[in-house]
Amino acid sequence: MGGSLTFDLEDKRLINEIDQRKVKRVLIQLPEGLKAEGCRLAAIVEKAGAVAIISADPCYGACDLATLEAETLGADLILHYGHTEITRENRVPIVYFEARAKLDVKDAIMKAVSYLERWNSIGLTTIVQHIHVLDEAKNLLLDAGKAVAVGNTGRLKYAGQLIGCNYSNAQSVAKDVEAFLFVGGGRFHALGLALATAKPTIVADPYEKRAYEIGSEVERVLKQRWACICEARKAKEFGILIGLKSGQRRVKEAMEIKGELERNGKRAVLLAVREATPEVLMQFPSIDAFVNTACPRISLDDSSRFFKPVILPNETSVTLGKMTWEELCKRGWFES
């Protein structure tokens, strides 16, 4: 079986890791876009002398490590694809494969330049799949006469990198730029970038070789968020969701929110959850609204699926009248 045509999955490195570590059983964890490569990677592992088990569960990021599953299955090693390390997890050794995209970005960047004509200073960001072409993208923007800023707070592995719950690199330069260019496919990260920085955001998509604005989608999400907050203001009882995934266990934050709600005359209960789905939350009919301290994607991507409002932590302040909607929009939806 041949390798991926779109991503570098480092097959030779995989063989070396299995050989050098002398492991007997490994668990392969892949995000949805790479699940199709699972059987091929398992065959490589088995040829290298170890038993391979593929995790068929969803994987939403490096916050979603299958350590408990690996322990249960007796795996000596987790092979985690598509993300960089963001949290230390020592229960089972983990090897990260970043799955860099084998795509030319020039066409998409050049198409994005026309969308950026209104602004002179541009913030440049991407996800790990395209981090190796960020310098090329920067040079193309510089050649087009733009001033370019690439943030680096040290909180993520690479300068200019962002992940679904951490936009700190972009936020660190937001005051210095007029707009952002996101290099990558899909809309989730670009929407998060726009919400985190309150700046116009253009997408350069190397998969589709096109560029586009996401302003209308940002407006749609903002309307959804405002509707959730308005509905949550009527709530008497709140459920505060604590994620059970390795990078989502924000127990302290959940406890603080519980105390704040109770000080404002609300009832509040803590709910530990691995997968926050509408079906799971429907089991608690007395709860009027939920506060999501786990993955923000639950609230931002899936808002319309839930029958009751699922607000984010900083939206709680608006719900309780401690912050105005305008202040939240200016501040952004993600902590810097």
Image (spheres, rainbow, N blue to C red):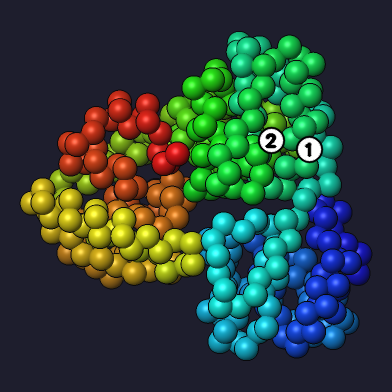
Crowd class of label 1 (few under 14; some 14 to 19; many from 20; radius 10 Å) = some
29 relative position to 17: left or right:
left
Q: Residue 185's x, y, as percent?
A: 67, 41
Distance between the Cα atoms at labels 2 and 1?
Answer: 9 Å
75 relative position to 44: left or right:
left
Tell me the quarter of the picture where residue 88 sits: bottom right
Q: Which mark is residue 152?
A: none
Identified at 18% across, 51% down, the residue is 260
- 156 up-or-down from 138: above or below: below
- 296 up-or-down from 204: above or below: below
Dot in front, 2 or 1: 1
Q: Residue furthest left?
A: 265
Identified at 72% across, 48% down, the residue is 129
Disc 1, SS = helix
Q: Are marks 2 and 1 in contact (CB under 8 Å)?
A: yes
Residue type (three-letter) at the residue carrying disc 2: Val
- What quarter of the picture does the C terminus occupy? top left
Res. 40 visible in picture: no
Q: Residue 108's x, y, as percent?
A: 76, 30
Q: Which residue is mark 1?
A: 133
Q: Which residue is mark 2?
A: 183
Residue type (three-letter) at the residue carrying disc 1: Val
Identified at 18% across, 60% down, the residue is 268
297 relative position to 84: left or right:
left
Q: Residue 35's x, y, as percent?
A: 70, 65
Disc 2, SS = strand
Number of numbered discs on residues: 2
